[in-house]
Amino acid sequence: MNHDDTPSDLQARLTALESRYAYQEDWLDTLDRTVAQQEKRLAQLERLNELMQRKIRDQQRALQENDAATPRPEDEMPPHY
């Protein structure tokens, strides 16, 4: 700031600063909303991931139980017994 700035120069600088401040305030509000939306979506994806992992474990368990219940060829007795 120069000491020889006129009142109109100071007014123009103040107006520019107020405009930048308003823009930055709006930008921060936009970022805040975006972060909140992303947090919500992340929570949804984490719940979905947990559900999918649980279903995969259940399917693996069911397959293992089915495999255990199904006789394997090497476990069968030969026909002459």
Image (cartoon, rainbow, N blue to C red):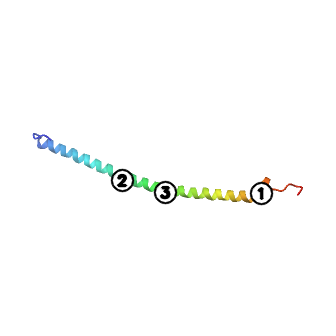
Relative image position of residue 35 (x, y in whole percent): 39, 52
Query: Camera-side residue: 69 or 49?
Result: 69
Left or right? Give the position of 77 relative to 28: right
Residue 2, above or below 43: above
User: At 15% from the left edge and 44% from the top edge, which residue is drawn?
Assistant: 10
What amino acid type is highlighted by mark number 1?
A: Pro
Q: Earlier in the sequence, mark 2 or mark 1?
A: 2
Mark 1 = which residue?
Answer: 71
What amino acid type is highlighted by mark number 3?
A: Gln
Query: Camera-side residue: 80 or 66?
Result: 80
Are dots 3 and 2 in contact, CB under 8 Å? no
Mark 2 = which residue?
Answer: 32
Label 2 and label 1: CA atoms lie apart by: 60 Å
Q: Earlier in the sequence, mark 3 or mark 2?
A: 2
Q: How many marks?
A: 3
Relative image position of residue 17 (x, y in whole percent): 22, 46
Helix, strand or loop under label 1: loop
Query: Camera-side residue: 8 or 60?
Result: 60
Helix, strand or loop under label 3: helix
Relative image position of residue 72 (x, y in whole percent): 77, 54
Relative image position of residue 8 (x, y in whole percent): 13, 42
| Residue 37 in which image quadrant | bottom left
Label 3 and label 2: CA atoms lie apart by: 19 Å
Mark 3 = which residue?
Answer: 44
Label 3 and label 1: CA atoms lie apart by: 42 Å
